[in-house]
Structure formats: C-alpha cells, structure tokens
Image: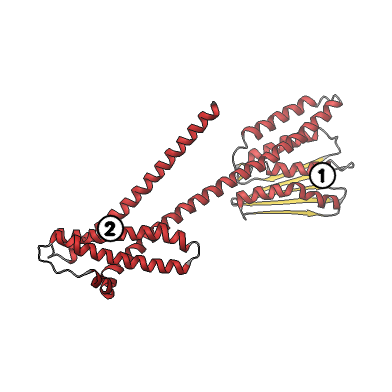
Amino acid sequence: MCQQKDFVFLFFGGLMKAKFFLQKRIVQHIVFWLAVLTLSVSRDVNQYQSTPFLTLFVNIFAEFIFQITTSYAIAYYLIPRLYFKRKYLSFVLWLTLLIYLSSVMCRVVTIYLAEPIVRSPPLQQEGICEIMTELGYLIRNYTLPVFSLTLLFLFTKFFIDYQRERERSLLLKSEKSEMELKTLKAQLNPHFLFNTLNNIYSLSVTESAKVPKAIGKLADILDTVLYKCNTDFVSLNSEIELLQNYIELEKLRYDDRLEVYIESNITSNNLVPPLIFLSLVENAFKHGAGEDCGSPKISIDIRTSENETNFRIRNTIVEPQNSEARKNIGFPNIHRQLKLLYEHNYHLETIVSEKLFEVNLILFK
C-alpha cells in the first residue's frame, strides 16, 4: 500500500514538474515572438509613415504567421530528424522546399486575405501561378524576411539550449565530484578507525593501564572525524590538533624506542582538506614504526605561507622495496581526493631511500 502511495506521489510530482517546465518554455516563446512583432511594427511605422497603421499591422501579421510556422518546422522537425541524423541532402532539399512554400503562402495570404481587409475594391491581384513563378520578387520580399527571422529564432533557441545544457552539465559534474569526495572520505575514515580499534584491543589484551587514556584520545578523534570533517576544508590548526591526538594514541603502543618529532612554522592558518594529513601520518606509523623492530623514527614538518601549505613527513623503513610497493596502497585515494578539490593546484611527491620513506605535499591556494 505504501509503495502504491509513493508511486502515485512520484507520478503526480513528475507531472507537476513537467507542467511547470512546459509553461515556462511557452512563456519564453511568447515573450520572444511578441518582442519580434513589436520591433517589426515599430520599424515599418517609422519607415512608412504615410501608410495607415492598420494596413501595416495586417501585412506584418500575415507574414508573421508564416515566419513562426517556418521557424518551428525547421527547429523542431528538419534539424532533429534530418540534420542531426546526418541526412544532409534531404535536409537541404526539404529546407529549400519549406522556405519556398512559406514564401508563396505568405504572398497568397497577404494578397487574398490581408489586403482585402484594408483596401477597397477593385483590387488588382496576381494569380497563383504568377505568384509561384515570380522567384525574384518572392526572394526579395518574402523569402529573405522569413529566413532571416528564422535564423534569429534558431540562434536564440540553440543559445538558450546550450546555456541550459551547460548549466546541467556543470551541476552534474559538481554533484558527481561531491559524491566521489564523500565516497573517498568514507573509505578513509573506516580504515583509520579499524586500525585504531586494533591498537586499543592490543592494549586491552595485556590489561594495560593505558587503555582509559587511549579511549579518551579515540573519543576526541571521533568527535573531530564525525562532526568537524563534513566540509571540504577545515582549518590547519584543527587538523594539527587531530594529528597530535592521533600521535599520542599511537605512541601508547610503543615504548620509548619510538621517536616522533614535530616541527611547525605556521604563519597563516590556511584551510586544508580534512583527514589528508592524518592519512599520511597513519601510513608512516603503519608501514614505518609498525614494521621497524629497532628504533623507528617519524618526523613531521608543517610550514605555511599566505599562498601555500607545506606538509612533509619522514619515517624510517626496514625494506625499501616493500615500502616502494606499499606506497601505492593508500596514495591513489589521496591523489583522487586532492584532484577533486585542487585540480592541479597541489604537489604530492614520495621519495624512497635506503632507510627512509618521505612524503612531500604542497597545497596551493
């Protein structure tokens, strides 16, 4: 029953949207043609001041009808059904025939319907055959006005359609980028949480007194990740605070053998993408300190200027070949997220030496 109600609601909702869109298009067309008619009347009134206004208006309106019909026939029939389907010869033939017949009919209506309204008999009127064969007169007085106005209509229509399609394309691109960015963040957060919970589990197995402190740090991190990282950018200071909490949480797993150095020169509290730095630090702990049974070292250097943010992290490694292979595990995600946010306004570099793995990230405004 609920599904039927939902279907009915969506159906009528779609009809209302379609009706609103159609009404909007109709109003636009009416405004366009009224503007064209007004300009045509104003032009002829200034040009033929001695001719009565009713005579001018009747003749203009007779031509106006065929200008409209020709424009719509070309725009909504010939172009989509012939030109867009690459039937160019058929398009040219039908276009020529349509314009010729429109010119003939326009002349016929003007002579046999419009002029009798504003002129008194007797009237000298050409025959149908004479009208159809006077090509020079038709082209000068009817074909050119009809065709020129049709071109104006086509230009206006396709320009508006192009703008509408461009806006739609930009909107879809923006929505797609936003969705991809949310997906990338969703992939990153569970990865971090999974590793952190593993760390707390390891401490709880040994009944370590560090467990309460670890849970407190995790609570602070979760508060940041869940409630303060829902935007594309966060302040650098808040991101540094998150890093410090994470580092303190990770250090609970190690003895004094782990050395972590943090240097910073923050002259501008720039905006940075949330969790990017955290992912790089997490990588250093996982593939650096986590695999080094000796005296692992991690150094972090953060510097800012008004136009850029520099983040550099180094960690000792045991096997350079493994580090070279593993650097590709999490970095495609980071690259993709930076690409969505910065396009080409960033630089991400990894350097692997014999005993050191280094990542340099520069974010430009």
From the viewer's perspective, tell me whether residue 231 is left or right of residue 288: left
Image coordinates for residue 199, horizontal then vertical, percent: 80, 32
Residue 240 figure quarter: top right
Give the residue pinned by disc 1.
Answer: 287
State which mark lies toward you, 2 or 1: 2
For badge 1, the amino acid type reads: His
Residue closest to the far right: 294
> Which quarter of the figure is the N terminus placed in?
top right
Image coordinates for residue 145, horizontal then vertical, percent: 29, 66
Camera-side residue: 223 or 38?
38
Camera-side residue: 345 or 332?
332
**Few, some or many residues within 10 Å of mark 2 (<14, 14–19, 20+):** some
| Residue at x 19% of width, y 60% of height | 113
From the viewer's perspective, tell me whether residue 139 is left or right of residue 211: left
Give the residue pinned by disc 2.
Answer: 65
| Residue at x 13% of width, y 60% of height | 118
**Few, some or many residues within 10 Å of mark 1 (<14, 14–19, 20+):** many
Instruction: Answer yes or no: is residue 298 visible.
Output: yes
Camera-side residue: 296 or 42?
42
Label 1: state its secondary structure. Answer: helix
Separation (CA) of disc 2 from disc 1: 77 Å
Q: Earlier in the sequence, mark 2 or mark 1?
A: 2
Image coordinates for residue 110, horizontal then vertical, percent: 21, 63
For badge 2, the amino acid type reads: Ile
Label 2: state its secondary structure. Answer: helix
Number of numbered tags placed on the structure image: 2
